[in-house]
Image: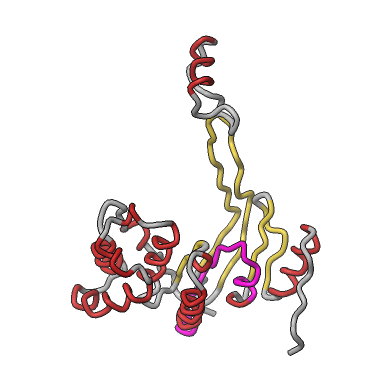
Amino acid sequence: MAEPMVVVDNLHVVYRVYGTGADRGTAATALLRMVKRQRRPSIREVHAIRGMSFVYTIGHAALLGVNAALMENLTGEKNVMLGCLAMGMSPQTVKERYQSIVDFSGVGDFINLAMKTYSTGMGSRLRFAIASSKNQDILLVDEALATGDAEFRVKSHQRIDELREHAGTVFLVAHNLNEIEQTCNKVIWLEKGRIVQAGENVTEIIDAYLAATGGEPRVREPQ
């Protein structure tokens, strides 16, 4: 058996939140804190992930660093180059793949503008196009498939299938159950930071999720 590709053992993620949603960032509450001589809003902790553990056992570990390399103040063109170089491509390879990346993303002439001017969907599509331009051992996709039109979703699914064929692992973070069922061969259902169910029985876990949350069961065509 190969070395595990991804091992998550007793993972905890805790965020610190200053103040509450009702009293954060308004002039009135700032003045009130000054009158009461409060130095800063109260601090509370949000325990987002609570002891999560799971293991994948195929392939070799390689972290995807493309998002860390991208810079919002630079143009899409510069970010394509930065992202590809960060993934280990040679300058010549970047040049050869540049146009196909831009075409896949669908950002068009906006490629010459700073990424900070992009909509959320445009930024997500360009990031996905860059990250998926090279076969990765591990690819992280966070809601990117929900940000494009039908044509982009079809292309994205096809690209993910290609990546999986090359023994890579694709993590898809999504709330769209149809995307999950069509794309994933393993699923993890998280609730309040804990794993409720996990495994390869994707359809059964989705049905259990719908039953638990009051969602309407879906009618599927017979195979």
Q: Is residue 179 left or right of residue 208?
A: left
Q: Position of residue 211 (x, y in %)?
A: 80, 63
Q: Position of residue 3 (x, y in %)?
A: 50, 73
Residue at the image point whose x is 29% and y is 62% from the top:
76
Residue at the image point whose x is 72% and y is 68% from the top:
206
Residue nearest the viewer, comparing 10 with 130 = 130
Does residue 11 lie above or below 207 as drawn?
above
Looking at this rendering, what residue extends furthest in the bottom direction?
223
The residue range painted magenta reads 165-181
Residue at the image point whose x is 73% and y is 90% from the top:
223
Residue nearest the viewer, comparing 63 with 48 = 48
Residue nearest the viewer, comparing 201 with 111 = 111
**Does the segment drawn in magenta span residue 105?**
no
Q: Position of residue 212 (x, y in %)?
A: 79, 59
**Does the segment drawn in magenta span residue 175?**
yes
Colour approach in the figure: secondary structure
* Residue 1: quadrant of the picture: bottom right
Q: How many marks?
A: 0
Looking at this rendering, what residue extends furthest in the left direction?
92
Q: Is residue 87 left or right of residue 174?
A: left
